[in-house]
Amino acid sequence: MNKNRSWVVLAVMVGCALLLMGGAPKLQALSDEEAYQRFVGTWVNTKYAGTPEQAQVTVIKPDYVGEDWPTPDSKSPVTNWKFIVKNTWVDEKGNTYCQYIAPSSKNPGWLNAWLMRVDKARKVIEFQWGSAETSESALTFPKTIDPKDPMYSILYREK
């Protein structure tokens, strides 16, 4: 009788463990393409100076091209770049991250390492610069966003 009771207790414990594991929150797995598409759109922050170095508008296109426009009324972008996606992930809060290389349009031959993050609601985008190098293997990619860093920027989805 004790052997049967032991098996029942063991079966109940295993069942509970499986139920708990199945109910645990899981990080969402996305392809790099699916993650990148979360960043696509027009992003604005009119508190910035509206200069080529601190544009008020960033446009991220589905074809892995980005543009900076000094102001919402500008007639053309001041710079554009190509995204070379290196790594993407979604954190436990649902924010999506993308580490990417942006070849320099101002300094040919140089590569820039960046991290961008879009919030779960896809209304806020943040950028963190890492390094600029002539060799991809020498780049240092940021792993976190630091709003206090001088090379940080934040923009909001255009409505």
Image (cartoon, rainbow, N blue to C red):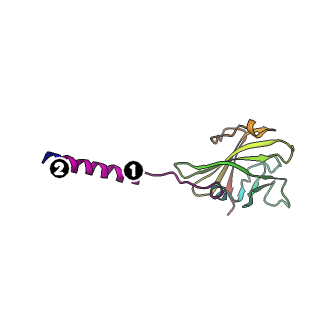
* Residue at x 72% of width, y 61% of height: 62
> Magenta span has 62?
no
Please provide the residue range marked out in magenta. 5-34
Q: Is residue 53 above or below residue 137?
A: below
The image's mark for residue 4 is 2
Q: Is residue 6 magenta?
A: yes
x and y percentages locating residue 79 in the rendered image? 83, 52
Q: Nearer the viewer, mark 1 or mark 2?
A: 2
**Position of 34 compared to 18: left or right?**
right
Residue projecting furthest to the bottom: 159
Q: Residue at 79% across / 48% down in the picture?
A: 49
Q: Amino acid at mark 1?
A: Met
The image quadrant of residue 151 is top right
- Residue 159's image quarter? bottom right
Give the vertical position of 99 relative to 57 (above or below).
above
Between 89 and 70, the one lying in front of the other is 89
The residue under the point 81% across, 61% down is 73
In the image, residue 138 lies at what x, y percent? 75, 35
Task: Estimate the spatial distance between the alpha carbons at disc 1 and disc 2, rounded to whole Å.
Answer: 26 Å
Measuring from the top left, give residue 36's x and y in whole percent.
66, 56
Residue that badge 1 annotates: 21
Return the residue nearer the eye: 119 or 82.
Answer: 82
Identity, as a three-letter code, of the amino acid under mark 2: Asn
Residue furthest to the left in view is 1
First-in-chain label (1 vs 2):
2
Label of residue 111 in the image: none
Please name the residue shown 75% across and 49% down the image: 48
**What secondary structure characterizes most of the magenta part?**
helix
Identify the element where label 1 is drawn. Answer: helix
